[in-house]
Image (cartoon, rainbow, N blue to C red):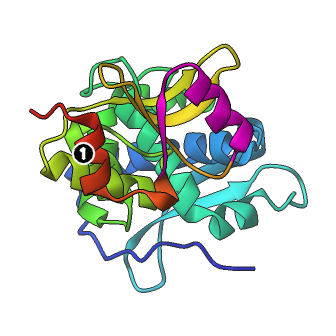
């Protein structure tokens, strides 16, 4: 099985940053539960110390004998991190705090006053995990954690060309066809993957459909027309 673990670099630790690391721990647990459809009751974690004296995060199964959840997390760490970043980026609570929609649960109630979205994002940024900085500081200032790298790259080129920000991650039409982006005024739709039925239905509704794999930024910028 391919190992999806992203390259990381060491980040300094001190007592003042412990609340940030706790926030990362619970962001990863919630992200793993959502990304891999693992019951949150089946996984937990703690801050520990590695053999070489460095602070580390340990995730483990809570099921007696283990159910393989922690192994699954390790094998899909890139996806887990993306979902974790998405969770703490998009929540509506104040960045300096947290809520049950992002980091809090009944299991960590003793830490609630120490958990914050800003703390988790600060560590994620400092770690510079591949793909995470693009997700947090994406084109047009948009968080793009559920978006493929090819779409993010195309968006980045479009933003550089001055193309106006589209509606991102939207369902279109009577049958709610998923689209990566929609520029409403020009009725340009960007989609990923091959689906002739989808493309025909959108075209019949008057949309100009562009597939990510077959589209370059200059071509799409010309079709959209509106720039900032």
Q: Quadrant of residue 177?
A: top right
Of 73 and 78, which appears nearest the observer? Answer: 78
Region of the chain picked out in magenta, as a range: 195-211
Q: Quadrant of residue 2?
A: bottom right
- On the rendered structure, is 228 left or right of 31? left
Residue 22 vertical placement versus 174 (above, below): below
Q: Which residue is mark 1?
A: 221
> How many other residues sit within 10 Å of disc 1, few (<14), some (14-19) or many (≥20)?
some
Can the viewer see residue 138 in this picture? no
> The residue tagged with tag 1: helix, strand or loop?
helix
Q: What residue is drawn where x is 66% and y is 27%? A: 201
Look at the image and say whether residue 168 sits in the magenta stretch.
Answer: no
Q: Quadrant of residue 54?
A: bottom left
x and y percentages locating residue 31 in the rendered image: 56, 44
Residue 193 vertical placement versus 190 (above, below): below
- On the rendered structure, is 134 left or right of 181? left
x and y percentages locating residue 150 in the rendered image: 44, 60
Residue 28 vertical placement versus 70 (above, below): above
Of 149 and 96, which appears nearest the observer? Answer: 149
- On the rendered structure, is 94 left or right of 169? left
Q: What residue is drawn where x is 54% and y is 73%? A: 5
Q: Quadrant of the N terminus?
A: bottom right
Number of labels in the image equals 1
Look at the image and say whether residue 207 sits in the magenta stretch.
Answer: yes
Q: Quadrant of the C terminus?
A: top left
- On the rendered structure, is 143 left or right of 49? left
Q: Residue furthest top?
A: 174
x and y percentages locating residue 214 in the rendered image: 48, 59
């Amino acid at each position: 099985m391919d190992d999806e673990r992203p390259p990381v670099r060491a980040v300094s630790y001190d007592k003042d940053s412990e609340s940030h690391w706790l926030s990362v721990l619970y962001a990863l647990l919630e992200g793993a539960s959502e990304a891999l459809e693992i019951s949150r009751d089946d996984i937990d974690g703690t801050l520990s110390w590695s053999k070489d004296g460095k602070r580390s995060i340990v995730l483990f199964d809570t099921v007696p004998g283990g159910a393989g959840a922690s192994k699954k997390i390790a094998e899909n760490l890139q996806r887990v991190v993306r979902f974790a970043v998405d969770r703490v980026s998009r929540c509506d609570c104040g960045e300096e705090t947290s809520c049950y929609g992002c980091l809090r649960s009944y299991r960590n109630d003793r830490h609630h006053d120490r958990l914050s979205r800003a703390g988790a994002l600060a560590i994620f940024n400092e770690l510079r995990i591949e793909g995470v900085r693009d997700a947090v500081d994406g084109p047009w200032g948009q968080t793009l954690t559920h978006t493929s790298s090819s779409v993010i790259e195309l968006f980045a080129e479009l933003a550089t060309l001055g193309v106006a920000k589209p509606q991102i991650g939207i369902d279109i039409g009577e049958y709610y066809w998923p689209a990566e982006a929609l520029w409403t005024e020009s009725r340009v739709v960007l989609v990923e993957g091959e689906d002739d039925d989808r493309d025909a239905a959108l075209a019949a509704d008057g949309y100009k459909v562009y597939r990510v794999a077959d589209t370059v930024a200059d071509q799409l910028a010309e079709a959209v027309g509106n720039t900032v």
